Image (cartoon, grey):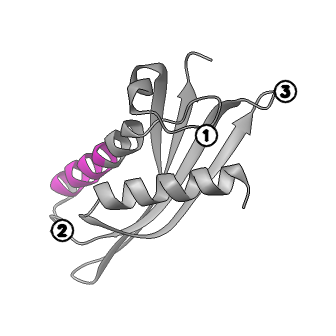
Amino acid sequence: MDKEKVLSDKLNYLIRTEAKQFVITDFYVEFVKDKEGMIEEYDVDITFDYQGKIDPEVYDFTADVSRMSQTLQEIVAKYPITPDGKINMEYQDFISVDGVIWKIDYRFDESHVFHMSFKVDLIVR
């Protein structure tokens, strides 16, 4: 098993353990490396079904989605990966995390499936 797969599996486990309010159905990490093979940035793509209550009113729904995005962004930021490919919680001050919602599959009283991506830039290399 290659180092990136092991690292991705560890990150997957940590995020799933921390994000119990989300039923994560798909998880993928893509690494971008520099010419020396050090990690410059990585993307964490997460698909999940949110099991909590979501308010159907537009304003409240937007607030709920924003809160979910912020929660996942904080969880992703909690487990930063260093340029040499190690998860180091002391490295949190040296990363920048930006989240994007790619797709929402919302069915009232049925399912709330979200596809989000988080780009993590390493500020100090």
The question of residue 98 being in magenta is answered with: no
Left or right: 87 with respect to 49? right
Q: CA distance from mark 1 to mark 3?
A: 15 Å
Visible residue check, residue 81: yes
SS assignment for the magenta stretch, majority: helix
Residue contact at pointers 1 and 2, CB within 8 angstroms = no
Task: Name the residue that disc number 1 marks.
Answer: 42
Task: Name the residue that disc number 3 marks.
Answer: 35
The question of residue 62 being in magenta is answered with: yes
Q: Nearer the viewer, mark 1 or mark 2?
A: 1
Q: Amino acid at mark 1?
A: Tyr
Q: Is residue 78 above or below residue 54?
A: above
Q: Residue at x 61, y 56 (%)?
A: 6
> Which structural element holds mark 3?
loop
Task: Name the residue that disc number 2 marks.
Answer: 52
Left or right: 125 with respect to 118? right
Image coordinates of residue 109 in percent, x first then y, are 21, 82
